[in-house]
Amino acid sequence: MEFTRVGTEQIALLAAGTILWVVVPLVIAILWVKRKKEKVTTVLFGALTFFVFAIVLEKPIQNVLIFPTAMKLPEHAVSQFINARPVLWAFLVGLFPGVFEETGRLVIYKTVLKKEKNREVSISHGIGHGGFEVMFILGMTYASYIAYAFMINSGAFGEIVEQVRAAAPDQVDQVYAIADQLAFFSAGDLVINIVERVFAVMYHIGASILVFYACKEKKYFFLYPLAIVIHTLLDGLMGLNLAGVLTVSPWTMEGIAAIMGCGTFFGAYFLLYKKDTMITAEAKEVSV
């Protein structure tokens, strides 16, 4: 079993990406905390939100319902029904992170961050949530890709294929796809990932602002379900593209993500965060 050798350039790009996915989120968090004199724990609670609600809670439930073979479980009637309907599949792929992650923000704001009322908390939480997602998903993915690259070049990758074939035969094609992706990985692929993550983090910060104000004032509680709808729509469109219902280029999808990510961030920032700043300033003037 032979695979195309992964070149030095590809390995170097993967290494650069791995460093990027770990260092940049940490630098952004440190600069924000120092500049705004925010609590590091608030950023960490943002990271904890993603880990608990997206990784520990959401993924296992989603896998059992939609991707049982990922849990080494047999296909069942529900998963077969969902996977046979691409639009429903894409909707659920978007709905799960929408409900779990936005509810996670709500729970954290209502519990451990309940006493934190300053507006900066919303951005601190978003930086922690979005930054940790980058580190956990892309950082670990790129690091594993480097390991796969060396295994391919040494001839040991075939063992991985055979292990997957024995445990989950339907995922063998995905393993071959990874090998092909690594062999032809380019600077353009890295740039697409960077662009995608920039807008994803912008979304997470914007969503954290929305849910923060949903918890802060009862009249703004509608912002919590709004965040779920936006998150579901964003991930659902990605799902439609993966399912082949939409056939658009990666850059077109990034354009859609850019519009939604920027729209969520700037809308939340100027209509809520910035407005709250002006109200606070006016209140101080009155008190003086």
Image: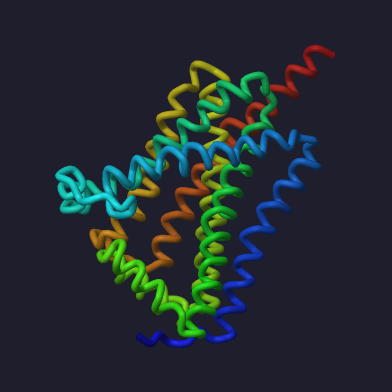
Image spot of residue 196 (x, y percent) = 50, 59
Q: Decide which of 180, 239 is in the foreground and name it.
A: 180
Relative to 243, 251 lies left or right: right
Relative to 115, 74 lies left or right: left
Say if 103 sits above or below 98 in the image: above
Q: Which residue lies furthest to the right in this view?
A: 288
Relative to 135, 54 lies left or right: left
The residue shown at (66%, 19%) is 115
Place residue 173 in its image quadrant. bottom left
Say if 191 sits above or below 31 in the image: below
Q: Decide which of 49, 60 is in the foreground and name it.
A: 60
Image spot of residue 282 (x, y percent) = 73, 20
The residue shown at (33%, 54%) is 70
Q: Decide which of 196, 26 is in the foreground and name it.
A: 26
Image spot of residue 83 (x, y percent) = 20, 52
The residue shown at (55%, 60%) is 140
User: Considering the image in quadrants, where does the C terminus appear?
Assistant: top right
Say if 271 sits above or below 68 in the image: above
User: Considering the image in quadrants, where does the N terminus appear?
Assistant: bottom left
The residue shown at (41%, 77%) is 179
How many numbered circles are shown? 0
- Specify how the rendered protein is coloured: rainbow
Image spot of residue 228 (x, y percent) = 41, 35
